[in-house]
Image (cartoon, rainbow, N blue to C red):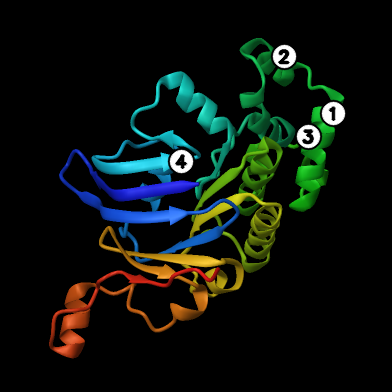
């Protein structure tokens, strides 16, 4: 479970990226984050895996109080959290196989991790092959990552998340720079993980994809949570517009208070 209470993040330059976000994400949900650039989506995701520390408020991820973990405890948590970023984070001079198997290193001791990269056990090769086959890249098993297109590298990142066996998957704009076919492949894999009981939280710019694949949406604007509810209710809401734009249209201050729909029991 993810639980945030009055979560706030202010950067060193004074930028207030998140303001008082309170939300609970339950195990097994597939939650989409929507909002304009600078709304706080990436900041929220980075807080969830400990790349950033909260400025104020409380954040608990899989039972761990973020901002209070020792380095060892944070490493243990990250074994359970798979991260897919827009920039792929593949190692160019390694093969696709070894890039995928990096997702397994958190489950091994340091010595076994180094050995795994030097002499890959057959069962790990099979694990990587199955993951790559799922994203349509089985034939690229021994190709160097630098030879792949951006879309192919993104699929390698998804395959890496598959082999990690994480219970929480965080994806930051995973389909922002790929073609529609690749985007659908990536989102289908994320939906399969959700259907297997994994928790998936992803940020998206494409509302159509969010409506088609997510079971719940969170709308962020100006660092504030302005929507929390089912996809079907979000159409027509002004989460992508600034307060000034809405005021110009309506001649009044915008009603950007948080809209919350209680989940059906």
> Callout 4: helix, strand or loop?
strand
Residue at numbered disc 3 = 142
Residue 241 percent across, percent down from the top left: 28, 74
Where does label 2 land, which residue? 115
Give the label on residue 226, or none: none
Distance (Cα) linking label 1 and label 4: 31 Å
Cα distance, mark 4 to mark 2?
A: 31 Å
The 10 Å Cα crowd at callout 1, few under 14, some 14 to 19, many 20 or more, is few
Query: Along the horizontal axis of the image, is 70 left or right of 31?
Result: left
Front residue (pair 261, 114): 261
Q: Quadrant of residue 164?
A: top right
Mark 3 and mark 4 in contact? Answer it, CB < 8 Å: no
Residue hosting label 1? 123
The tag earlier along the polypeptide, 4 or 2, is 4
- Ranked by sequence position, the earlier of labels 1 and 2 is 2
Residue at the spot of label 4: 61
Q: Would residue 205 be found to the left or right of residue 53 on screen? A: right
Q: Quadrant of residue 81 in the image?
A: top right
In the structure shown, which secondary structural element does the residue marked by tag 3 occupy? loop
Going from N to C along the chain, the mark reached first, 3 or 4, is 4
- Depth check, mark 1 against mark 3: the one in front is 1
- Give yes or no for contact between labels 1 and 2 (Cβ–Cβ under 8 Å): no
Q: Which residue appears at 69% of the width and 61% of the height?
A: 188
Q: Marks 2 and 3, how far apart in space?
A: 18 Å
**Left or right, 212 with reference to 218:** right
Q: Quadrant of the C terminus?
A: bottom right
């Amino acid at each position: 479970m993810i639980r945030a209470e009055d979560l706030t993040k202010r950067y060193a330059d004074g930028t207030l990226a998140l303001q008082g976000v309170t939300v609970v994400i339950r195990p097994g949900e597939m939650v989409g984050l929507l909002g304009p650039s600078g709304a706080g989506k990436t900041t929220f995701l980075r807080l969830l895996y400990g790349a950033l520390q909260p400025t104020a408020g409380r954040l608990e991820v899989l039972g761990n109080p973020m901002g209070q973990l020792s380095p060892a405890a944070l490493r243990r948590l990250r074994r359970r959290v798979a991260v897919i970023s827009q920039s792929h984070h593949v190692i160019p001079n390694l093969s696709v196989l070894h890039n995928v198997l990096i997702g397994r290193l958190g489950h091994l001791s340091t010595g076994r991790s180094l050995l795994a990269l030097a002499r890959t056990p057959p069962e790990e090769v099979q694990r990587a092959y199955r993951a790559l086959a799922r994203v349509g890249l089985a034939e690229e098993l021994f190709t160097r990552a630098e030879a792949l297109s951006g879309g192919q590298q993104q699929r390698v990142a998804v395959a890496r998340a598959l082999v990690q066996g994480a219970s929480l998957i965080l994806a930051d704009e995973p389909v922002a720079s790929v073609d529609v076919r690749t985007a659908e492949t990536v989102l289908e894999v994320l939906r399969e993980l959700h259907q297997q009981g994994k928790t998936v939280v992803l940020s998206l710019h494409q509302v159509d994809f969010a409506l088609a694949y997510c079971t719940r949406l969170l709308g962020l604007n100006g660092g504030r949570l302005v929507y929390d509810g089912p996809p079907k209710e979000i159409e027509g809401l002004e989460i992508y517009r600034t307060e000034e734009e809405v005021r110009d249209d309506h001649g009044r201050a915008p009603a950007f208070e948080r809209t919350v729909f209680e989940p059906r029991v």
